[in-house]
Every structure is written in structure tokens, then in C-alpha cells.
Image: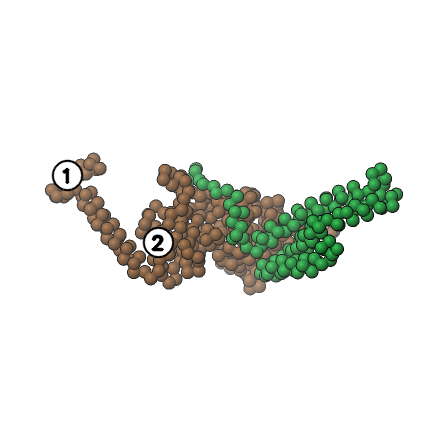
């Protein structure tokens, strides 16, 4: 009994092919959550540096801000990132609603179906948003 | 070998004339082994189908098995064969040192929860025909392996006992032999939670329990649910049990991955029970007066 072979924790994620719906939902929820937190800080950083140096935001005429934003929006990569951001946010919202029901104890037997539904909805909304987000650059 | 033979020449003088009893026994054993060998060959060739199983082997006390490895066995398949049947055949036929726990063979004792084809299942309840062949059989993940398919269940049992799984009613009936009655509705409510057979499949599937050794785990929380939701339970004990369950490493560790509910061989809605205890915990702590 003194010696035993511990296979460690790493193998659990090495088995990702065998994960079930609930596990994927958890992983995606964590991932999208962290991406949204990352985006929030990037967002604050971009907006707070998009004012003319030496002025306070309210005093300027906002031209510097407008040109910065327009410059960013001209980049194709930014447009694609925006589509990705929407997908991430929509999934997080949908799965968040799913988790709300799980916490309330409603429909726990169809939790896998609600996960697939949130994936499908995310996909549909993302596809539908592409014309809006990519207008003008392509 | 020779010392053993000369130990009892006085008692068995007759045998001495031909061969020693030890020799005779060994001779018989060789014959039986040869016979068995032939029988196996016959069984294998007679069987319409054979199934391959790959079994995890590890034994820290045997030099050959110190490094974990997989052994392959070929087993004749029959209709209705369970994974446990295949393991028993492999042990009785090929390698008597193949070690695994089993007892009742009907999904009641909970001894043979194994990691079969990448999922926690009861070997006795899992049909060979339902699986992809060859079948890969490993000990339960996230528990220390003692030998081959046997894992150390001590930690699991500790967690089960940590929730004080016993009745402590406030009042008992007056009559000496009178039962403590329960309404049929209340019985229905706790019915599924009483089915737990302590097999440990849920705990092994839970990746929160894998990362947090102090987490009570689904089985223990289900055990707490079983008593907390029973109307016969005393109020003080119920509150105490809720306090245990609502600690940092109690219900709040659960992140609703549903892994435990998926693997439970008795189909206990574990996540649902954990969620209900979470709500109970919130209710008992939220006071607006």
C-alpha cells in the first residue's frame, strides 16, 4: 500500500476526445469568460489612450479619438476579431442562461441539449453578423 | 525442493518407493495445465467470436510490473457477456495474478467500478457487445493504484463518512418497536439518492475532485442530500450537516460539468442533488430579518 502509482491530473485533459457535453460547456464557458475579461482590459486601454495627449477627454473635440477608431476599423484583422468577440460574448450569454437554469434546478436532464442549442444559436448569430461587421473592408 | 521431499519420509513410506508425493502432485498439476491449455485452445477455436481486452497492469512489488503497462488477452465471446466475465476468464485462464475487485456481479456491491474504454463503468453491468473492441480496461482515474485494477478507496470512504451519514431524529415513536414513518412523497424525493452503492465512479469522473483533494465529491454530497432531505431527520443534525456541506470544499466546488451524473451506474441525478443542496445552503444563510 505504501507504494502506489499515481497517474496524475494531466491525463484528464489529454482525454479531451472523450469529454461529454457538460464538460465542453464548462471548458468553453471558462475560456470565453477569460477572453471577455481580456477584451474588457484591452477596451479600456484603447479608449483611455485614444485621447490627445495633454488634454482631458471632455475638453478636446474628439478628433483624435475618431481618427484612432477609424484607423482601427480599417484593419481587416480588427473586423474579424470583432466577429470573434461577438461569437465569444454570445456563447457566454447563452451558456450563462443555461447555467442559470441549471442553478435553479430546471431541466437538468436536458442540459446537454441546451448546450448544443447554445452552440447552434451562437453559430447562427455569428454568421448573421458577418455582413454587418465586414461591410466596407472586403 | 529436495529439502521439502525429505521432510516426511516416515509418514509416507509407500510413496517413497515410486515417486515422492510432491512429485506426484506436480505431475498431476502439469497434466491439468496441459489439459487446460488444450481446453482453452478448443474454447477459443469453438467460439464464434473472440474479444480482445487490454488490461492495465501495475504492481510495485513485482520487478516485471513496476512500470505500468497493458496486457492483451483474447477471450471467447458469448451473448450477454459482461466486461467482468471477460476479466474473470482472463484471470482464470491466462494470468492468475491479474487483480481486480468484484463480488456480487449484479451492480449492487459497487466493487468493480473500472475505467472501461475511457469512461467510468461497472464491469459487471457493462455489456461487451456495447463496447468498441478491443476493450481497454484501466483502474479508476484520480485514485492511487495499489495493484493492477485495484485502487485505494480510503480517501473516498473518508469523504463519505465526513458528511455524517446517519439518522439522528429529534423524536422517536412512543411504541418500543414502532417504525419511524415517512410519507410516500418524501420517500420519492430521496429514493434515487438512496441507490448509491459507493462504487466511486462519480468521484473519479469529477475533475474538480481530481484537482481539489478536500472536495467532498458527488457521492458524499449525495449522501448528505439523502439524510438532509429526509423528513425523519432531526433539525439540529440537519443544520450541522448543511454546515459541513456548505463549506468552501463542499457543494460550492461543484461547477456543474455533469460528469458524475453521466457515469453513475445507478442513474442518480447527482448534479441535481448538489444543486438542490446549494439552494438549501443559500436559503439557510439568507435572512432578511
| Alpha carbon distance from label 1 to label 2 | 47 Å
Question: Can you see residue B111?
Answer: no
Q: Colour of chain A?
A: green
* B9 to the left or right of B253: left
Question: Of the numbered discs in the image, which one, if any, rests on residue B94?
Answer: none
Tag 2 or tag 1, which sits nearer the N-term?
A: 1
Task: For label 1, count other residues whose C-alpha is less than 10 Å away and answer few (under 14), some (14-19) or many (20+).
Answer: few
The residue lying toward the viewer, choosing from B252 and B224, is B252
Mark in the foreground, 1 or 2:
2
Work out whether disc 1 and disc 2 sit on a shared chain. yes
Q: Which residue is mark 2?
A: B74
Question: Can you see residue B247?
Answer: yes
Task: For label 2, count other residues whose C-alpha is less than 10 Å away and answer few (under 14), some (14-19) or many (20+).
Answer: some
Q: Which residue is mark 1?
A: B10
**Tag 1, which secondary structure?**
loop
How many numbered circles does the render carry? Answer: 2
Amino acid at each position: 500500500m505504501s507504494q502506489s502509482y499515481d497517474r496524475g491530473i494531466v491525463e484528464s485533459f489529454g482525454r479531451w476526445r472523450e469529454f461529454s457535453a457538460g464538460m465542453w460547456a464548462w471548458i468553453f464557458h471558462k475560456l470565453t469568460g477569460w477572453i471577455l475579461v481580456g477584451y474588457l482590459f484591452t477596451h479600456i486601454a484603447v479608449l483611455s489612450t485614444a485621447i490627445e495627449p495633454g488634454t482631458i477627454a471632455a475638453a478636446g473635440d474628439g478628433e483624435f479619438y475618431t481618427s484612432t477608431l477609424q484607423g482601427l476599423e480599417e484593419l481587416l484583422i480588427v473586423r474579424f476579431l470583432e466577429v470573434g468577440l461577438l461569437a465569444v460574448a454570445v456563447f457566454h450569454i447563452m451558456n450563462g442562461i443555461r447555467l442559470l437554469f441549471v442553478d435553479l434546478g430546471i431541466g437538468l436532464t436536458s442540459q446537454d441539449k441546451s448546450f448544443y442549442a447554445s452552440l447552434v444559436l451562437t453559430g447562427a448569430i455569428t454568421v448573421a453578423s458577418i455582413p454587418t461587421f465586414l461591410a466596407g473592408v472586403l | 525442493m529436495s529439502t521439502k521431499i525429505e521432510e516426511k519420509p516416515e509418514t509416507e513410506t509407500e510413496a517413497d518407493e515410486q515417486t515422492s508425493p510432491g512429485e506426484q502432485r506436480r505431475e498431476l498439476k502439469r497434466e491439468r495445465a496441459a489439459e487446460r491449455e488444450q481446453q482453452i485452445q478448443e474454447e477459443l477455436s469453438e467460439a464464434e467470436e473472440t474479444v480482445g481486452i487490454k488490461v492495465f497492469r501495475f504492481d510495485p512489488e513485482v520487478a516485471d510490473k513496476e512500470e505500468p503497462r497493458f496486457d492483451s488477452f483474447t477471450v471467447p465471446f458469448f451473448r450477454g457477456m459482461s466486461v467482468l466475465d471477460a476479466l474473470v476468464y482472463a484471470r482464470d485462464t491466462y494470468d492468475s495474478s491479474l487483480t481486480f475487485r468484484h463480488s456480487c456481479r449484479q451492480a449492487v456491491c459497487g466493487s468493480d467500478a473500472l475505467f472501461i474504454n475511457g469512461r467510468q463503468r461497472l464491469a459487471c453491468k457493462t455489456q461487451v457487445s456495447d463496447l468498441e473492441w478491443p476493450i481497454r480496461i484501466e483502474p479508476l482515474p484520480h485514485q492511487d493504484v495499489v495493484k493492477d485494477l485495484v485502487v485505494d478507496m480510503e480517501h473516498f470512504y473518508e469523504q463519505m463518512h465526513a458528511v455524517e451519514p446517519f439518522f439522528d431524529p429529534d423524536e422517536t415513536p412512543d411504541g418500543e418497536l414502532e417504525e419511524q414513518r415517512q410519507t410516500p412523497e418524501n420517500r420519492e424525493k430521496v429514493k434515487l439518492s438512496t441507490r448509491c452503492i459507493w462504487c466511486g465512479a462519480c468521484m473519479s469522473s469529477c475533475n474538480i475532485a481530481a484537482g481539489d483533494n478536500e472536495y467532498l465529491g458527488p457521492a458524499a454530497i449525495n449522501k448528505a442530500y439523502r439524510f438532509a432531505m429526509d423528513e425523519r431527520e432531526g433539525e439540529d443534525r440537519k443544520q450541522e450537516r448543511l454546515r459541513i456541506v456548505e463549506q468552501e470544499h463542499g457543494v460550492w466546488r461543484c461547477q456543474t460539468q455533469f460528469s458524475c451524473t453521466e457515469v453513475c451506474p445507478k442513474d442518480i441525478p447527482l448534479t441535481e442533488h448538489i444543486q438542490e443542496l446549494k439552494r438549501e445552503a443559500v436559503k439557510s444563510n439568507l435572512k432578511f430579518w
